[in-house]
Image: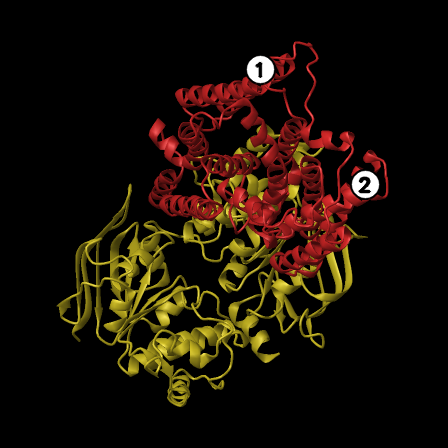
Amino acid sequence: MTTTASQETTADEQGATGKGLGHYLIAHMREYGLLFALIAIMGFFEIVTGGTLLKPINITNLVLQNSYIIIMALGMLIVIVGGNIDLSVGSVMGFIGALSAVMIVEWQVSVPLAVLACLITGALIGAAQGYWVAYWAIPSFIVTLAGMLVFRGLSLWLLEGQSVGPFPREFQALSTGFIPDIFNVKRPNVTAIAAGVIAVAVIVWMGFAKRARNRAYGIEDEPFGLFVIRNVVIAWAFLFLVWKLATFRGLPNVLITMAVLTIIYAFITEKTTLGRRIYALGGNAKAAKLSGIRTERLTFLTFVNMGLLAALAGLIFAARLNTATPKAGFGLELDVIAAVFIGGASMSGGVGKIVGAVVGGFLMGVMNNGMSIMGIGIDYQQVIKGMVLLAAVIFDVYNKQRQA
Amino acid sequence: MRSLLEMRAITKTFPGVKALDSVDLEVREGEIHALVGENGAGKSTLMKVLSGVYPYGSYEGEILYDGATATFSDIKDSERHGIIIIHQELALIPLLSIAENLFLGNECASAGVIRWEETFRRTGDLLRKVGLKEPPGTPVERLGVGKQQLVEIAKALAKDVRLLILDEPTAALSESDSQALLDLLLELKGQGVTSIIISHKLNEVRRVADTITVIRDGSTVATMDASGEDVSEDRIVRAMVGRDMSQRYPDRERRAGEVLFEVKGWTVGHPEHTDRTAVHDVSFTVHAGEVVGIAGLMGAGRTELAMSLFGRSWGRDIRGEALLRGRPVDLSTVDRSVRAGLAYVTEDRKALGLILDETIQRNITLPNLGAVSRAGVVNEAEETQVSERYRQAMNIRTPSVFQKVMNLSGGNQQKVVLSRWLFTEPEVLILDEPTRGIDVGAKFEIYGIINALSAEGKGVVMISSEMPELLGMCDRIYVMNDGTFVGEFDAEEASQERIMSLIVTE
């Protein structure tokens, strides 16, 4: 028996652990690859657009343009990790935008009340779809495909085929507002810089705390050199972007919304029992159920959450355009889903990270933005985006096979 | 008799691991050759080399097949030469008919158009050969596992098999289905088909095999003539593990305490066939510190009984009463059952037990995450300590608890599942086929764990299809057949014959 045992152990060791920088990089190729790809693509477009990409006004634009995709990607990641998919988010987003416009512009409902009503409606829509998926075991692809058609139709009906707007300033601030400079320097915006510095400090501090914890429990850690390089790159990128934003109008409100939501959802998925159970559900629903996890309710909740975030995205989108159009949100579900898969989630569930989805969303956003600046036609843009998505997934599958 | 196959000094290396180290195997024409060895010994790898899954050139050594050097490039290639392998996991398509499955990839067709009449006629012939009476148009999903296994063999016959390789063909079969399958093998042998059978069940090997080759740690350690007088199961086991297994079941002081768990009149309806009851009026008791066995054939309703008790995870219209220490307990959901002190270790650890893509640590804490969390936030440090504790206590062989479960061997996976349920601190554990598909050494360790649990005063219910295991481990054995308990034995009075006769006469 002992000989067999030692043989097994060597085989296992081959699988994951091992020493050395190269080995570590290969084992975590996906995470570093994504970060590297984002930087490389930004660098590429910065050069070919002659420095337009990273102009303060364009960075601000990038944030505003992609905020709603990234907010929905947070919910979509959770739905996908749970082993489902939601095709209706684009339509739901458009519908909620339409609803907000009708309430605020036509019915003169106060903005806070309308926002609250829209968020609740979004959650209810998610619940209505999640109910069939969770408790009737109808494939989410079908339920949400139906939802996509239904809410597209309802948006048209609600707006009677017309655009409705404009919104009051109060509502527009959801999207196009900026955090005022409390230090009153205005340009550069000191609040923005301070926020950036604090964010970097927290990230680095958390990195060190994690290293200390890993060491205490003998968990294999990132080689120190790599840790330093990664943190320097991230810190530099953060400070660079914040500086650019600060020299324009400061931090957009949506950036804060997005950052706070990202932190909350990263915390939920990585640190809480709720998050842990969602991964277990997606990894093996039957085993999760036999471990006492209420899988139906959990699936249901992932859809309620998705509906809520789609509603928030709808409000932000309407506020940004300052009008609700019947076509708002068409096809956006595909961008959201693409962001999640580029970010490393697995179609079969149980695998994926919030940060990955956010980076994936920005990667798509930078490509959209960069190609538009270059004047590449929408035809080629679609082709290129499609190829990038395919490449990311092939890379995943290749990695998995190589490790097996 | 001349030899059909000779594998000489086969060596196969994977990066960092030598899976096969100069293995020799000689199979004579028209014999049944048994290949035995612990899990991970290299049996499957050897068969993959033979069938071309690992193509010619990716291994060292020589394969002589039918007098010539074989250079198979893939499975199709070896199949053309009449070498057909039937894997443990059946490769049939459930929704297609028997006929369609038999000729899948090998259709009777002209220019891509299937000749149905010929297909059905030939299917009829083949089914008669393997002793199946089902119409050729029956969808495979309507057949039991035993019959599906026969369809697999018919599929091999459709391809003009000369050398049939069966990987653990009876692992999922009931006693009577296994017998039927072994009889068929003997019959095919009479018709000139040579077989290699990989099996853990030594009694079966002894029954059908002409020659037995034992593989250990990637090398051939013994080849025995099965008809020889001196070939005993003990001798085979000795060769497999490389040491004397004087004791296959560890000793335990038998000392049952008060009644711990009691079930009265448990009746469970079948979830799909509303007119059937899968479990009918079952009553039993488990004392503290007792190991109670449930014997029976596959399909007798043992797993259904266990899963219906554990949070009503199976069945409908469940009636009956469950008492823990004399008080009624609420077992209506898995969560409540766990909190009441019940644990169920599934028979199907890959499909129903483990989350293969997750780490050992996360698998262990799953049902009792609350114990390592505060206000819904998991304390990962504490979690690591807990799982590290179980890794050592259960002797899970892995470099760290952050290893993904799918990288572990069957025995170690089973220890992870056991750890998970021990972490819920149960009073009563229901173990469903706890040693299925794991090697002799790991089995012994699992038996040790079971004994330790009973020494702590926990009640253990052990469901097993291996009767020697029940006889070796249990204080009392219930016999289940067709959804009801048909008998109960004390350990001293039980024997395989008495149990089996209860099952067949009822």
- Asked where in the image residue A252 lies, by quadrant, the reply is top right
Contact (CB < 8 A) between labels 2 and 1?
no
- Chain B rendered in what hue? yellow
**Mark 1: few/some/many CA within 10 Å (<14, 14-19, 20+):** some
Q: Position of residue B226 (x, y in %)?
A: 29, 69
**What residue is pinned by disc 1?**
A197
Amino acid type, mark 2: Val
- Of labels 2 and 1, the one closer to you: 2
Which chain identifier belongs to the red chain?
A: A
Q: How is the image coloured?
A: by chain
Of residues A182 and B505, the one drawn nearer to the viewer in this rendering: A182
Q: Is residue B434 visible?
A: no
Q: Position of residue B326 (x, y in %)?
A: 79, 52
Q: Dot 2: within a 10 Å radius of its alpha carbon, few (fewer than 14), some, or many (20 or more) residues?
A: some
Quadrant in the picture for residue B299: bottom right
N-term-proximal mark, 2 vs 1 = 2
Q: Which residue is mark 2?
A: A105
B199 vs B233, nearest the viewer: B199
